[in-house]
Image: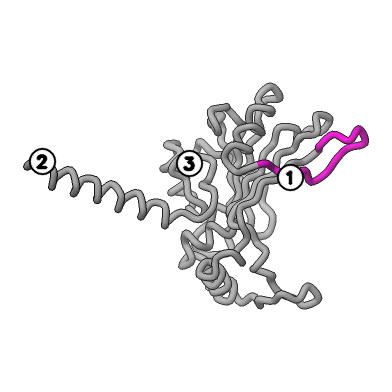
Amino acid sequence: MKRRPYLILISFLVFLVAGCSQSSSYGTPAPIKNLKWGMNVKETLDVLGIAEKGLTETSSLGTTRIFKANEKIKIHDRPAEVSFTFDYYSPEPILFRITAKFKPEDVAYIEKELNKQRGQGSILQYNGKNEPMQISWKDASLQTNKEWLAAVEKVYTAMGMKITENLMENGVNVMDKPITSCVLESDTNSPRYGTVSFDGSVAAMLNYPERFVPKK
């Protein structure tokens, strides 16, 4: 009988920790364990457990830079060629996209895993044979959570951007933005077949709103 208070205390602590971890995540997690949308390059390297030389810059356009991992990384238990896209608009680079290219024999498995994790995907485009070329998965949009919507609007405003719901106006329509999304290239005739683009732009703003400020 004396052990019961300890068991109750342990159960409470487990519940508390689980509750905190759930409330601090925004949308579907990044596809690599412990990686968070909005991390900078150093944080990303630390999570991956690789040195800076383990990444090679492959593209640079405006404030966006893409780095490819020199070694394959497992995503959903399948090895893939993985690239990380950072935005250098702010003083700290911000991770907002991960692109993974899987082997052709793994594509069906990856599609199944994404359906399991995120629900049934939506076909964006068909080819001439009525076969799906792209399949998309999206989290709920910001309009479903007023607190998150207000937080993201605040970030855009801090960056000097106008918030608007009018498509005819210059500005950003925040309400319809999904927390995270991903697209699978499923056209077997495309050189991008088996490529999945994971986008966490909105989740990055929710994770690290203080990082989204223009460079001085």
The amino acid beneath tag 1 is: Ser
Residue labelled with disc 2? 3
The amino acid beneath tag 2 is: Arg
Q: Position of residue 192 (x, y in %)?
A: 75, 35
Work out whether mark 1 precedes mark 3 in sequence or the reverse, and give the earlier one: 3
**Crowd band around label 2 with a 10 angstrom C-alpha radius: few (<14), some (14–19), many (20+):** few
**Crowd band around label 1 with a 10 angstrom C-alpha radius: few (<14), some (14–19), many (20+):** some
Residue labelled with disc 3? 52
Please give the name of the residue rendered at 56% of the width and 36% of the height, measured from the top-left corner: 69
**Crowd band around label 3 with a 10 angstrom C-alpha radius: few (<14), some (14–19), many (20+):** few
Q: Position of residue 211 (x, y in %)?
A: 48, 64
Residue labelled with disc 1? 122
- The CA span between labels 1 and 2 is 52 Å
Q: Which residues are magenta?
A: 120-132
- Check the image and report above or below for 88 versus 123: below
Q: Is residue 21 left or right of residue 62?
A: left
- The CA span between labels 1 and 3 is 37 Å
Q: Position of residue 30 (x, y in %)?
A: 53, 45
- For label 2, the SS is loop
